[in-house]
């Protein structure tokens, strides 16, 4: 399975920690979306990556992009994590059916039960314009996402 550059990303609706349900196609209709899959809330590398994204949130907005982070944590865990880390971008839960969206993007580690680090930049038609996948312990550099948005 999986989604490659140039392909249309599957549409999905996932819960956010605040109880709302977020649909990918509705986000894309507004502008580019940076989908950031991560293994777990409250872990070292994930904290560092998501803090860096929060610090650069305005730069992404200036490029017309919305940041959306997804993990297999429960919506409640993600809400608590967002509050603890002062994260203001959208965090979505792929908790149930467990990892279904992560699987569709081929970033779900079946043997471990969580997502690896995958990033996808989608345009307004949900076409993948750029992607990057790293192993669970490898921190990503969000400046690469900004560079990709500028081309």
Image (spheres, grey):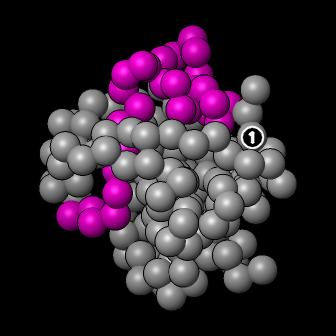
Left or right of residue 105: residue 82: left
Q: Residue furthest top?
A: 111
Q: Residue at x 31, y 44 (%)?
A: 21
Left or right of residue 39: residue 85: left
x, y (%) of residue 109? 59, 22
In which image quadrant can residue 136 be found?
A: top right
In which image quadrant can residue 123 be found?
A: bottom right
- According to the picture, the residue beneath numbered tag 1 turns out to be 3
Q: Residue furthest right?
A: 6
Q: Magenta segment range? A: 86-113
x, y (%) of residue 83? 16, 56
Query: How many marks on residues?
Result: 1
Left or right of residue 5: residue 126: left
In which image quadrant can residue 87 be found?
A: bottom left
Q: Residue at x 43, y 20 (%)?
A: 98
Q: Is residue 46 visible?
A: no
Q: For residue 97: magenta?
A: yes
Q: Secondary structure at mark 1?
A: loop
> Closest to the observer: 31 or 39?
31
Q: Residue at x 36, y 44 (%)?
A: 92
Above-or-below relation of 108 to 122: above
């Amino acid at each position: 399975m999986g989604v490659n550059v140039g392909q249309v990303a599957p549409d999905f609706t996932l819960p956010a920690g605040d109880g709302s349900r977020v649909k990918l196609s509705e986000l894309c209709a507004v502008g580019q979306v940076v989908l950031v899959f991560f293994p777990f809330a409250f872990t070292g590398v994930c904290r560092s990556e998501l803090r860096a994204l929060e610090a650069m949130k305005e730069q992404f907005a200036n490029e017309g992009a919305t940041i959306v982070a997804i993990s297999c944590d429960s919506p409640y865990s993600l809400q608590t994590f967002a509050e603890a880390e002062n994260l203001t971008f959208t965090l979505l839960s792929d908790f149930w059916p467990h990892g279904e969206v992560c699987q569709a993007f081929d970033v779900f580690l079946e043997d471990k039960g969580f997502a690896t680090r995958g990033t996808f930049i989608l345009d307004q038609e949900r076409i993948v314009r750029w992607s990057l996948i790293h192993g669970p312990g490898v921190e990503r550099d969000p400046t690469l996402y900004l560079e990709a948005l500028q081309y």
